Amino acid sequence: MTTWAGWIITVAGLGHTIGSLAETVPHHLGAWFDGHLWSEHEYAEQSDAAAGFWYSVFSFGPPLILIGVLVLWLGRRGLTPPAFLAWAIGAWVVITFVASGPSPLPVLLVAVVLVLLAARRPGPGGGSRPSSRLASGHPEPRAEA
């Protein structure tokens, strides 16, 4: 479940980032690197180049890729991401979907559900234990023979 969630989050971040870069770079790359953005301090007077920068490079896409890769990394080690991460992504998806309208964003709710289900699973990496010594970096105590 965790690995699927990680892939969904990573692909969503990659999709937004690659798509927005393909749409903005051909038109605004020069303005991004000539100091044009440094002079834009008023949001209401933002140029198309600045809007394109916020839409692509400085958007939610790159952090979403990092979160997705982190979830994959945890999943491959048998660890479950904390439930607060899923709740935070879920809240963000709902708020942005309501505010901005129809988009592919709700696909992230599938990842949210998968992480929440994985966190409730009993056993290592699941959430049924009060705290996991493995997740905190402390190994399990050895049994004395």
Image (tube, rainbow, N blue to C red):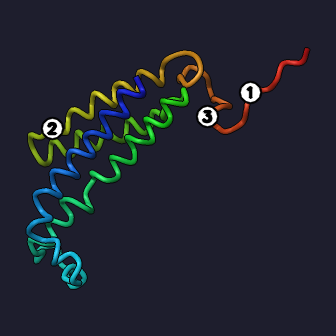
Left or right of 114 in this view: 22: left
User: Which of the marked residues, 1 or 2, is nearer the chain's N terminus?
Assistant: 2
Closest to the observer: 76 or 129? Answer: 76
* Residue 22 place in picture, x, y as percent: 13, 56
Left or right of 77 in this view: 109: left
* Residue 33 place in picture, x, y as percent: 23, 78
For the N terminus, the image quarter is top left
Residue 41 in sight from this viewpoint: no
* Residue 78 place in picture, x, y as percent: 54, 26
> Residue extending furthest right?
145
Circle 3 — which element?
A: loop
Residue at image coords 34%, 25%: 113
Q: Residue 35, relative to residue 20: is it above or below?
A: below
- Image quadrant where residue 84 sits: top left
Residue at image coords 28%, 44%: 92
Q: Residue 74, relative to residue 56: is it above or below?
A: above
Q: Which residue is mark 2?
A: 104
Q: Tell me the crowding category of disc 1: few under 14, some 14 to 19, or many 20 or more residues within 10 angstroms, Cα based.
A: few
Q: CA distance from mark 1 to mark 2?
A: 42 Å
Q: Amino acid at mark 2?
A: Pro
User: Which of the marked residues, 2 or 3, is nearer the chain's N terminus?
Assistant: 2
Closest to the observer: 130 or 136? Answer: 136
Q: CA distance from mark 3 to mark 1?
A: 10 Å
Q: How many marks?
A: 3
Q: Which residue is mark 3?
A: 135
Q: Amino acid at mark 1?
A: Glu
Circle 1 — which element?
A: loop
User: Which of the marked residues, 3 or 1, is nearer the chain's N terminus?
Assistant: 3
Residue 33 in sight from this viewpoint: yes
Does the CB distance between marks 2 and 3 fall below 8 Å?
no
Q: Which residue is mark 1?
A: 140
